[in-house]
Amino acid sequence: QVQLVESGGGLVQTGGSLRLSCAASGSILSIRAMDWYRQPPRKQRELVARITSGGTTTYADSVKGRFTISRDNAKNTVYLQMNSLKPEDTAVYYCNAEIFTGQSGLSDYWGQGIQVTVSS
């Protein structure tokens, strides 16, 4: 059984910063890509950033230059540093990871989601 637990969300003013963390635990053999998604109110979930097991990163155009994704493989944790936040960044943020386990092989796992609210 695998769990992803997010932390670090909250309320921040425009221009402020937050750092999200997502820790994976359980019967993990290895983790491939780790992603951050977000779902703004009344909109579809969208990919924000991705980091591969080798450290290659990709970002949505809307966050390039403001957000940085990183990971600590020893801790099975992915981070999202969010700077220069804007009201349009307000959303529930979810982490996602492609994880090898002994029982299930390679599967996608999701965190429970964490609220980020940017006030104007």
Image (cartoon, grey):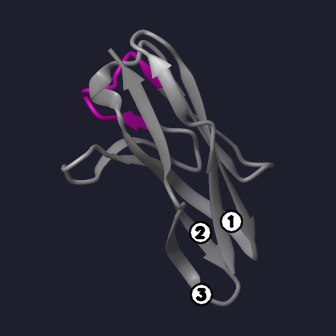
- SS class, disc 2: strand
Where is residue 85 drawn, in percent x and y?
40, 18
In this rendering, would 39 be left or right of 114? left
Disc 2 to disc 1, C-alpha distance = 6 Å
Mark 3 touching mark 1, by CB under 8 A?
no
Mark 2 touching mark 1, by CB under 8 A?
yes
- SS class, disc 3: loop
- SS class, disc 1: strand
Residue range corresponding to the magenta coloring: 57-67
Disc 2 to disc 3, C-alpha distance = 9 Å
Q: Is residue 105 above or below residue 54?
A: below
Q: Residue 99, which numbered label?
A: 2
- Res 87 quadrant in image: top left
Give the residue number, with chain letter if any, for mark 3. Answer: 104
Mark 2 touching mark 3, by CB under 8 A?
no
- Residue 97 falls inside the magenta stretch: no
Q: Is residue 70 above or below residue 93?
A: above
Where is residue 82 drawn, in percent x and y?
49, 24
Report the residue at 33% width, 29% height from top. 89
Report the residue at 32% width, 14% height from top. 120
Disc 3 to disc 1, C-alpha distance = 12 Å
Q: Residue 83, which numbered label?
A: none
Closest to the observer, 38 or 51: 38
Q: Residue furthest top?
A: 15
Q: Is residue 4 above or below residue 9?
A: below
Task: Answer few, some or many: residues within 10 Å of disc 1's Cα (few below 14, many 20 plus, some between 14 and 19).
Answer: some
Give the residue number, with chain letter if any, for mark 1. Answer: 30
